[in-house]
Each structure stands twice: as C-alpha cells, then as structure tokens.
Amino acid sequence: MSSMGRGKVILLGEHAVVYGVPAIAAGLGRGVSASASPANETTLECSPWGTRHGLASDEDLGRALSAVVAAHPSAPLPPLRVSADVALPAGAGLGCSAALGVAVIRALDAAVAHVASDAEVAERALAWEQVFHGNASGLDNTMAAHGGVASYVRGEPLEALDVRRPLRLVIGNSDESSSTRTMVESVARQRERDPERFAKNLDAIATLVKNARLALEAGDTRALGQLMDLNQALLSAWFLSTTALEDMCRAARDAGAAGAKLTGAGGGGCMIALVESDETSAAVIAALEALGFSAFEAEAG
Ligand code: MEV
C-alpha cells in the first residue's frame, strides 16, 4: 500500500509566515507516494531521480531520513527499504520536500502498523523540513499532511477555510530551481538591515492575507486576484521575484487571470494565476506556453 504526501501552493503570505503572519495555502492533488518493505538496511530510494540514501549518508535526504527514523514513536524501527515516487518538481515552490517527508513518515508508519493523525504526521515532518529549510515555518509539512484550503499561523493548528467557490489555479513553472533555505535567509538579512521597513512590509502582507480570507469566504474571485497581485508586489520588494516570474505574471493577467503571483520561496520556481473559467484557464496556459514555460491547471484544495 502506498502512502501519500501532498504538494501545496501558497495563495498569500509566504515568507511573512516565518515571522508569525498567517498564510493561506491550498493542497494539490499531486504529490509524493511512498511504501516501505523489510530489508537488510534502511534506505530511501526516490524515483524518477534515481537516488538512494542510507542512514549514514551526510546528504540532506539521508540526514532527513535519519531524523524521522530516529524520532519514530516505535523506534528502534526494523530495517526498511522506502521507495518514493515523486510527482512534483523539486525546488519549484510546490512543497516537494515536505510532501516527500510526509509520504516517507506515512510509509514508515504503515510498515510498523503505527496509526497517526494528520496533525501528528505534520509535527514529525517538521524535523524532516528543518534539514532542508533551516528556519521552516511549518507550513509546508502541515499542508503536505492535511491538504485542503487553509489558514496557517506558525506554531498553531491548521485552520480549514470555508471557501465559497472552488479555487481554479494555473501553475506556471519558470524552470529556475531555487533553494528555500537561501531565500528565507536572504529575507532574514533584509530584516536585520532595515527592521522598520521590514515590519511595514510584514504589516501590509498581514492586511492582504486578512482580506484574502474574507474574499475566499465570500467567493469574490476578483478581489482575491487583486490581493494576490498586491502580495506579488510586496514579495518583489523583498527581491524574491525574477524576470521569468514577472513575465509569467504579466502574461497571465493579460490573458484574463484575476491575479497572479509567485508561490513559495521565490527566486525561481512557480507562479500561480487565479482563473474563473475554462476559457481563461486555456488562454493563460497558452500565453505561458507561448513564452516557453510549462503550465497546467492544478487540482487545488
Ligand atoms: C516555502 O514554501 C514557504 C516559506 O514561507 C518558508 C516557510 O514558510 O517555511 C518561504
């Protein structure tokens, strides 16, 4: 039996969430599936990457595996061969590492018949995320375990949102890979350099997130789109956007999207565009593809 961790998109509030501002995120239909079977030693194999890591590996994947194996509630675990199938691009802002961590934890649980709630899995996956992201807010691992459309505040339980209309999002991939750790550290340096300016940006994002929640609950797609556009401008002010992301956002808006922004850590990775109809979805995908980017409509929420 295979165990799943979901990818996610952040609708508003990435980076600010590291500093305690709420973020709104949606789980994706795709993610990572994994299974574990008895073996001579504990390893993690990931396809389609073709990687294999054991507990002694000093690479991130090996260290993350060691962290969740050592901290397993039924530790010491018997040796297990964990095989993961990764259906998300890595370093693209879609929560690939967290989805992998959650899938691995669930596969370990299934192998030793440990029953865990989504909240417990999310909490254990934070140790995995810290290996990759350093100062992770906990959003990605929480969304990877729960899915849905939700508001997240660092250190608090996830709050599912009552969304009036299904969320329709086109995801465009810049194909520039970026490191969440590097981007989070670069934002932290800006905070150190100019704390007052940083606090103003944080307040502005908090206001956008608050209004976005109201827009989602009221089913006001136009307002939500405008708030996403404003969030994109504030993320650009933290130097998180790139030429490719800006080009994609502009093309999506010109093709009729209600709003568009980078999603996740930025510095590359993906852009999300909010669409209201099949026609707009197709037009946005065509506009992104015409620029040479891959794009698809996500099953979100
Ligand atoms: C990454 O998907 C989201 C960030 O806000 C980092 C985090 O919340 O840990 C950039």
Image: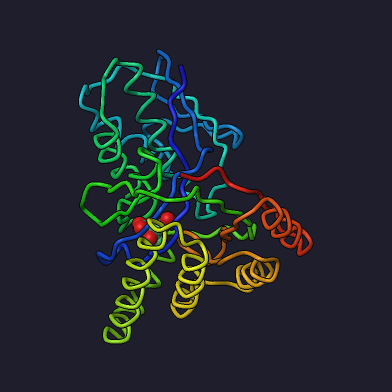
Residue shown at 47% from the left, 65% from the top: 224
Say if 223 sits above or below 216 in the image.
below
Count of numbered circles on the image: 0
Quadrant for ligand 1 reads: bottom left
Residue name at image x 43 percent, y 66 percent: 183
Q: For residue 127, which quarter of the picture? A: top left
Nearer to me, 124 or 62: 124
Is 268 displayed left or right of 154 in the figure?
Answer: right
Q: How has the structure been colored for display?
A: rainbow
Residue 159 x, y percent position in the rendering: 28, 48
**For residue 69, side relative to residue 156 (left or right):** right
Residue 253: where, in percent of width, then height? 64, 69
Q: Is residue 32 above or below residue 235?
A: above
Residue at figure coordinates x 25%, y 56% from the top left: 154
Residue 111: % across, % down: 35, 16
Q: For residue 236, say whether it is visible.
A: yes
Image height of 104 relative to 234, above or below: above
Q: Nearer the viewer, residue 38 or 222?
A: 222
Q: Nearer the viewer, residue 144 or 89?
A: 144
